[in-house]
Image (cartoon, rainbow, N blue to C red):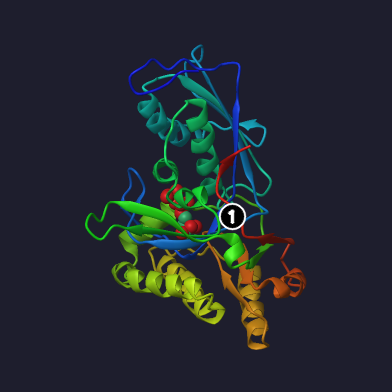
Amino acid sequence: MVTSNNTTFIPDIAHSFKAQAQPNIALIKYWGKQNIPGNVPAVGSLSITLEALRTETVVRFDTEMSADAFVLNGASNPIGLPRLSRCLDLLRHEAGTHCRAYVESENNFPTAAGLASSASGFAALVIAAGKALGLQATRSRYAQWAREGSGSAARSIYGGFVEMYLSKNEKTDVITEPILNPEEWPLEVVVAITSTDVKSVSSSAGMEHTRLTSPYYSHWVKAQDEDLHDAREAVLARDFERLSIISEQSCLKMHGLALASRPGLIYWSAATVACLHAIREMRAHGHPVFFTVDAGPQVKAICERQAAAEVARTLESINGVQKTIISRLGHGARLV
Ligand code: DP6
């Protein structure tokens, strides 16, 4: 297979290329866009990449195909196809080809249920497609392509603790960088699954609705640099207490904005709220654990390694918690 910007791309139709990526969970949340095309966030964010949840994506380009094809978890997925094709177009443009692709993706966890499947999905997609197209691109370029698929996907290109922030000079320039490797602060995450239903309001729709209708939105944007700075310092100092406070606040602020939009968005279930109380209670009793919740009813309890088993036991005993998954921090998206 030969590619470059100046030569014709000849697809290697005999070969599929496979990549794996893990979802990431934001401790400082991205919620709101400056620009919808390209998913340029209005605010920076800071996340941890999980190890136990995985997306594996296979990509094959084929000159015989007249349109892209997308199979997700064993079934054709026409709903996800336009977004996927738009993301592939960026890589096709780079490779100088219009060749269509067959994409097959599999998650080992519930899809579109608030477990960041779009983050791992687009991160795995660009890595596999880039290889299939023979692109020689940097990780930051892959992060940019992944972000154009889904904002949070840029962070799944990297492992451990990852920051995505806006350049000081050019506010639409988005920089995504790893801050610490998983081994440098081996925290664990207990994911409490309270529902495997597909969420009724996607993150993209929810954040846009919030931007347009929440009275707190402008304050959220203004305060975010300070929150990001605080969290970055806490991570670099491995200061669990400080990270707990700022992360829980960022989560509750994000949900506060969403709740105050019109009509208000309620992503939580009764079990979600019960988990939050249980986590606060465990912390009050000396267990190093704090919570975060994304645009869905699942709760992620971030803890020091020695606390994970007890945290999982406690969350499993809560009415409405279907199961828990304990995860270490994971590495970035890669070919497999
Ligand atoms: C609550 O990255 O899914 O998980 O850019 O529209 O695809 P799009 O949104 P997405 O939003 C993630 C929202 C969040 C917080 C976060 O991950 O930072």
Residue 225, position in %: x, y? 33, 69
Side (left or right) of 155 relative to 141:
right
Q: Is residue 71 above or below residue 119?
A: above
Side (left or right) of 211 relative to 276:
left
Q: Residue at coordinates 61% horizontally, 56% vertically from top-left?
A: 50
Q: Nearer the viewer, residue 279 or 168?
A: 168
Name the quadrant of the C terminus.
Answer: top right
Q: Residue at coordinates 57% horizontally, 33% vertically from top-left?
A: 77
Q: Residue at coordinates 51% horizontally, 11% vertically from top-left?
A: 64
Image quarter of residue 275:
bottom right
- Report whether residue 11 is seen: yes
Residue 150, position in %: x, y? 44, 46
SS for tag 1?
loop
- Report whether residue 297 is seen: no
Residue 169, position in %: x, y? 22, 57
Residue where numbered disc 1 is placed: 115
* Amino acid on which the number 1 mark rests in the picture: Leu
Q: Residue at coordinates 49% horizontally, 37% vertically from top-left?
A: 126
Q: Is residue 245 above or below residue 14?
A: below
Q: Is residue 188 above or below residue 198?
A: below
Q: Nearer the viewer, residue 33 or 235?
A: 235
Side (left or right) of 190 relative to 17:
right
